Image (cartoon, rainbow, N blue to C red):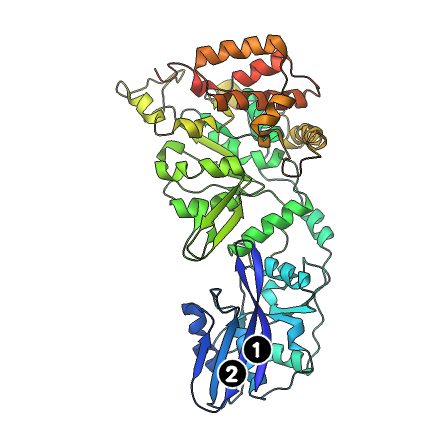
């Protein structure tokens, strides 16, 4: 007898339905075909043990399981449940009253029949609804995540027996229904890290506000203990809240990567990723035999913080150059190319020299001649060009640390940032792929960032003195446009341009001595 159920495979951040066909005929042995990986092939042992533990004596007839389309590689243990249901149905051990072809069925089986959670549930649920299937049967730990998608019956089950009882009508399981918007808006809360806790550093706060308002990349240069990491961790608290669409995008990526916790739902806060400097190329941008998202994709719609930037391997930093421009990364393999979104703000920090005290107001730098320049040269010029704001962080003195003055909170700063972003949203409403000033292509910069004759004279003088590249020219114009937006000014004035120019400190001639 032949039985059909639906599973799913995730490629990139999208899912594809997989038809699990089970045929029981005369003969002996079990075969799984359709490009299964090692985990899928091993499912035979898990299924046998789970069925016996659930008191199903499956006859030793020849069983062929085909995972179609057969030319797409199948990965993982999530096919255990649909294959087990297919074996029982094809062998006439159960007679489902539910139409199996109306449900996506997924879950990993433990040897005692208990279901373990799987990853990639959200894109699978979206594909199930798009394919007009009725429901999704899956481990109860993943039900909350799947219920984000409306118009889909989400049936959370704890064991193989629960799934069988539901399909045969022996047990009624009510679909899990959640209000996605209610979950989303209730999860948007205050961040623990707030700019009101930062004493002094007013110029750095200003730079962070500009960066958040325009979606610009930032590098902070300063000695140890100056507060670079503390400031970086507070940037998500002043970014505009995620929209529902952005939250779904972000949740999909984390779901595919298996980064959502058990019984997790929609991600409502902008991600903040801070990988260690020993990270590999593939871990940062994504990759592997079966491509998975890397840190730059996990930071999508949020912040990627690279602490001690020169300590990262040069090859790791260089692979970021294209994603920083295109806001996506394409992982190419022989048989497929997978695209992951990577629209993130890059926040980097570094010491000015190996000892960390070059240009320190109190401590003496102990580095030998030429060490400062050599240290800075670990970061390539093309990568620095892609960073809009270069900010020098100086240590906070005792009077500032001990001050009891009330500082401006993240909430107040975020209000100004949101207002500037609203101006940009209106400006780019005819361009669906552009959401902030930092995303403007070069041809649009010339049109939107008009600085007048006086501004051109100032910028020409700055470029000649600092030796700026054409890309740096565009970056300065974008930052000045953001500063003007924060001032609610339709035109870019001289003071806006001058402030933007001062944030190119690493371009200064002889900066490193």
Residue 484 quadrant: top right
Q: Look at 68% across and 30% down and name the residue there.
A: 424
Residue 209 quadrant: top right
Which residue has dot 2 on it? 51
Count of all numbered marks drawn on residues in the image: 2
Along the line of sight, which residue is nearer the eye, 128 or 231?
128
Along the line of sight, which residue is nearer the eye, 197 or 333?
333
For the question of whether residue 409 can be seen, the reply is: yes
Of the numbered discs 2 and 1, the one sitting upstream in the chain is 2
Question: On screen, 173 above or below 342?
Answer: below
Q: State if disc 1 and disc 2 touch (CB < 8 Å).
A: yes
Question: On screen, 115 above or below 441?
Answer: below
Q: Decide: few, some or many residues near mark 1? Use Cα within 10 Å; few <14, some 14-19, many ≥20.
A: many
Please tell me whether mark 2 sits on a helix, a strand or a loop: helix
Residue 140, horizontal then vertical, whole percent: 61, 67
Question: On screen, 283 above or below 199?
Answer: below
Give the Cα separation between the discs numbered 2 and 1: 8 Å
Q: Is residue 80 left or right of residue 316?
A: right
Residue 227, horizontal then vertical, whole percent: 48, 28
Which residue has dot 1 on it? 160
Residue 281, horizontal then vertical, whole percent: 39, 44
Q: Quadrant of the C terminus?
A: top left
In the drawing, what numbered circle is on residue 468? none
Q: Quadrant of the N terminus?
A: bottom right
Q: Decide: few, some or many residues near mark 2? Use Cα within 10 Å; few <14, some 14-19, many ≥20.
A: many
Residue 273, horizontal then vertical, whole percent: 50, 42
Please tell me whether mark 1 sits on a helix, a strand or a loop: helix
């Amino acid at each position: 007898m032949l039985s059909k159920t639906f599973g799913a495979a995730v490629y990139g951040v999208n899912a594809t339905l997989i038809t699990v066909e089970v045929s029981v005929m005369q003969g002996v042995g079990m075969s799984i075909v359709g490009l299964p990986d090692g985990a899928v092939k091993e499912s035979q042992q898990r299924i046998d043990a789970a069925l016996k533990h659930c008191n199903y004596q499956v006859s030793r007839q020849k069983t062929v399981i085909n995972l179609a389309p057969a030319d797409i590689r199948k990965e993982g243990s999530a096919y255990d449940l649909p294959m087990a249901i297919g074996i029982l149905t094809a062998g006439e051990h159960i007679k489902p009253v539910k139409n199996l072809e109306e449900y996506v069925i997924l879950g990993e089986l433990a040897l005692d029949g208990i279901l373990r959670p799987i990853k990639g549930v959200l894109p699978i649920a979206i594909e199930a609804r798009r394919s007009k299937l009725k429901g999704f049967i899956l481990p109860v730990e993943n039900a909350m995540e799947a219920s984000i998608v409306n118009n889909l019956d989400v049936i959370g089950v704890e064991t193989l027996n629960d799934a069988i009882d539901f399909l045969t009508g022996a047990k009624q399981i009510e679909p899990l229904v959640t209000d996605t918007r209610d979950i989303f808006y209730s999860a948007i809360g205050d961040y623990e890290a707030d700019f009101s806790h930062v004493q002094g550093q007013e110029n750095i706060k200003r730079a962070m506000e500009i960066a958040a308002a325009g979606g610009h990349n930032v590098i902070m240069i300063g000695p140890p203990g100056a507060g670079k990491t503390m400031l970086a961790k507070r940037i998500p608290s002043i970014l505009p809240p995620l929209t529902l669409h952005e939250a779904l995008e972000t949740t999909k990526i984390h779901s595919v990567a298996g980064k959502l916790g058990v019984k997790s739902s929609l991600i409502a806060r902008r991600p903040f990723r801070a990988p260690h400097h020993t990270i590999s190329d593939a871990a940062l941008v994504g990759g592997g035999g079966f491509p998975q998202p890397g840190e730059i994709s996990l930071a999508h719609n949020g912040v990627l913080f690279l602490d001690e930037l020169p300590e990262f391997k040069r090859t790791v930093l260089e692979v970021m150059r294209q994603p920083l421009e295109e806001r996506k990364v394409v992982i190419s393999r022989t048989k497929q190319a997978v695209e992951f979104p990577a629209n993130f703000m890059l926040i980097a920090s570094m010491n000015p020299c190996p000892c960390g005290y070059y240009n320190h107001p109190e401590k003496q730098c102990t580095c030998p001649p030429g060490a400062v320049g050599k240290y800075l040269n670990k970061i390539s010029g093309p990568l620095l060009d892609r960073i809009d704001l270069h900010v020098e962080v100086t240590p906070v003195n005792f009077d500032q640390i001990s001050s009891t003055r009330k500082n401006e909170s993240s909430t107040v700063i975020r209000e100004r940032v949101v207002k500037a972003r609203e101006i940009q949203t209106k400006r780019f409403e005819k361009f669906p792929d552009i959401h902030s000033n930092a995303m403007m292509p070069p041809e649009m910069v010339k049109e939107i960032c008009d600085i007048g004759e006086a501004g051109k004279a100032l910028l020409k003088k700055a470029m000649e003195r600092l030796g700026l590249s054409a890309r740096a020219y565009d970056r300065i114009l974008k930052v000045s446009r953001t500063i003007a937006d924060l001032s609610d000014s339709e035109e870019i004035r001289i003071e806006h341009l001058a402030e933007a120019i001062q944030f190119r400190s690493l371009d200064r001639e002889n900066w490193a001595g």
